[in-house]
Each structure stands twice: as structure tokens, then as C-alpha cells.
Image (tube, rainbow, N blue to C red):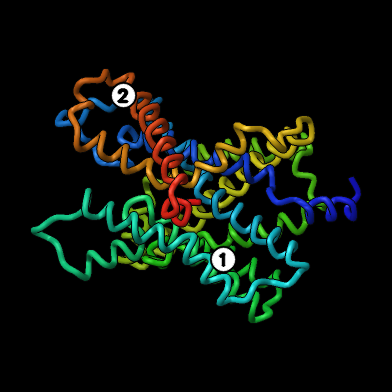
Amino acid sequence: RSPSRGLGDVYKRQILMEVAIMRPILILCIVIGHSFAIFSGAWPNPFEDKTVLGSPIYSSVNPLFISFQLAGFVFISGYVNSYINYCSRGKNQSLLKLLFKKTKRLLVPAWLFGAVYYVLFLYDLDTFTIKSCLLEIFLGAGHLWFLPMLFGCILLVQICESCRIRPRYILIALFLIVLLPSQFVAYTQFLHYAFYFYLGQIVWQKRFDINLKNKAFLCVNLAVYVLTFVLYDSQKADMLHCWNSFVSHMDWASFMSIVLVDFIKMLMCVSGILFLLGVILWILSKLNLQKNRIVEFSNKVCYGVYIFHQFILWYLVYHTSLIYNVGITELPFFFLSVTLVVSVVLAQMSLKTRVGRFLIG
């Protein structure tokens, strides 16, 4: 397909099929990862016997399924943003118009559902203060932290582009920020993720120059992802010790260790994202999924599934006795199946109402 013809095709499309497929896959990965989170220590152990969750296989599921996936969401948001700018004949949306649209799409659901999440799961009469409550909701309670973070990524990149900073300088600056220890950017996680948003924009703009579905390219990305995942998973537990050593003794060797591990994590995220996107593009080159009902339905409900899934999982794990009534081997699969079914039903029901369509439509 020639570039000129390709641009014309894209101009007429209303849905990017690669995004419509990739987004539900990433959501599914997140739900799987959270279903196994108690086994890896990502979530608190709910059992009195703390040795009951000792399966090495189960403990690796959460790190695997939540490795590049969050960065992947940010990446496809940038990817879609470039597509939207192209559809407006190259005229970028005004900053105010974009902020209004993204506030409705990201911040309003984060704050409304975050308030409910706070009341249900985080409120503690003994430690409650209005300041801590508002801060928790503002930054995104529970899993909803991702939505204000994504808003921050969009805002930062839009401001940089409005200032007419050259793309290469934006990319270099965001790349360097990715390498900073997370303690340097507390409460501003968007600084660590903005690189992936801008990378998504660049990949869409250069999609005809980069053959993402080339088999050699896919194999290289898969190999890099596997290698960096193993390295990162084996080293990330030492990062807090390195940071404490740097703060207390100004140990620059520890600081550089953190930077190196962050670089490995960045490579893991980028290679994982490009591999998944490349596989999807390769499949789309073989199959016509333009009007596939499963793809359409999955793309429609996936945002709602993300919003609802942790409400369900957290309730099942910490507010019921199911963890003692279901076998430990079957437990994460029970969590996964119930959470997926209920969250899909809730998303579908919500989309049938005006308020639901406003929040997650």
C-alpha cells in the first residue's frame, strides 16, 4: 500500500482497528494481573497464614501481565491523538478544547468513581482528614490513578507542542525523565509516562516508515521484551534499598543502579508495546475484522471493565469469605471469571443509560 493511498484510507476511517483490538487486550491483561496480585505481593495478603500464597508460578503472573500494559495504554492514547490531529487536516485541537474534552473523558469518571471507591474501601474514621480524602480522590483512588495521570501526559505534551519545541527535543527530554527515580516525581506520575504518549504519536506519524509487522522486527522486539522482563523482575526489589542508600549516603553508584533498572524497564515497555502492536497489524493484514462483532463489543465495554473491575476484585478479596471457601489453586481463576463477567455486565448496563454513556461511553 502506497503512503498516499494509505493516508487517504485512514482519513476516511472512524475507528483504528489496531487500537480497537489492542485496547481490550491490554484491559484483559490488567484484570488478569490484578486477579493474581495477592500472590505477588502487589496487593496485601488477605490470609492469616502468610505462607499460603507461596506459588512461584502464580507470583509471576502479576508482574508479567502488568509489565508494559499500563505504558501501552498511554502509548495508544498518543497514537490515537495523532490520528485525530490528522483527521482535522493537520490542525491541532486548541488547548482549551482538548482540556475540556479530556476532563469529561478522564477526570470526571476518575473523581466520581474515585469518591465511591474511597467511601467503600479507603475511608477510615480514625485517620480521616478532609485534605487526605480530597487528595486521594483528586489523584485517583485505587486503580483510578491512571486517569488523572493520562490527563497529565496529554496536557504536558500539548503544552510542549504549543510552545513549538522541536519534536526531537521533546522526545529526548521525556526519555531522560523516564530514567529518573520515581521518588523524584512523587504525585506527578505523568512525568514517567509522558514519554510513551509522545512515542505513540511519533509511531503513528511514522507508521509507513516503520514496518511494525515485519517478522524480523517482531522477533527482535519479542527477544528484547523477554530479556528485559527477566532482568527487571530480578532487580526491581532492590530499588528501594538503592534509593535509601543514595539519600542517606549520597551513594551515586546506587543512583546509577536505579537509572539502569529504569532504562531496562523502558526497553521492556517499548519492546512489549511494539511487539503487540506489530502482531495485531500483521493479523489485520491477513484478516478483515472491520465489522467483527466481538471486536466492536470488546472495544465498547473495555473502558467500563477497567473502571469496575477493581471494585469487584477488592470486594471479593477483602470483604467476603470466598478466599477460604475456594481452593487456593482455583482462587485467582475464580476471581478472574467473576470479575470479568460482572464488570462486562455493569459496563453494558451503564452504556444503556445517559449518565453511563457520559461517564464511560
Residue 234 visible to the viewer: no
Please give left or right for residue 22 compared with residue 232 in the image. Answer: right
Residue corresponding to mark 2: 331
How many numbered marks does the figure carry?
2
* N-term-proximal mark, 1 vs 2: 1
Q: Residue at x 37, y 56 (%)?
A: 242
Residue type, mark 2 in image: Leu
Q: Which label was assigned to residue 176?
A: 1
Residue 244 visible to the viewer: yes
Against 252, residue 122 (above or below) is above
Give the CA separation, mark 1 to mark 2.
41 Å
Query: Which callout, 1 or 2, points to the residue nearer the camera?
Result: 2
Please give left or right for residue 231 compared with residue 245 in the image. Answer: right
Question: Residue 289, percent across and down?
Answer: 71, 34
Question: Residue 96, percent across and down?
Answer: 55, 77
Q: Crowding at label 1, few (<14), some or many (≥20) Cα neighbours within 10 Å?
A: few
Element type at mark 2? helix
Residue closer to the observer: 246 or 202: 202
Residue type, mark 1 in image: Leu
- Residue that lies at the very extreme toward the bottom in this rendered image: 163
- Residue that lies at the very extreme toward the left in this rendered image: 126
Question: Residue 320, percent across and down?
Answer: 19, 32
Question: Residue 173 is drawn in which quadrant?
Answer: bottom right
Q: Residue at x 37, y 66 (%)?
A: 187
Question: Residue 299, percent across and down?
Answer: 57, 42
Q: Residue at x 55, y 43 (%)?
A: 300
Q: Which label was assigned to residue 227?
A: none
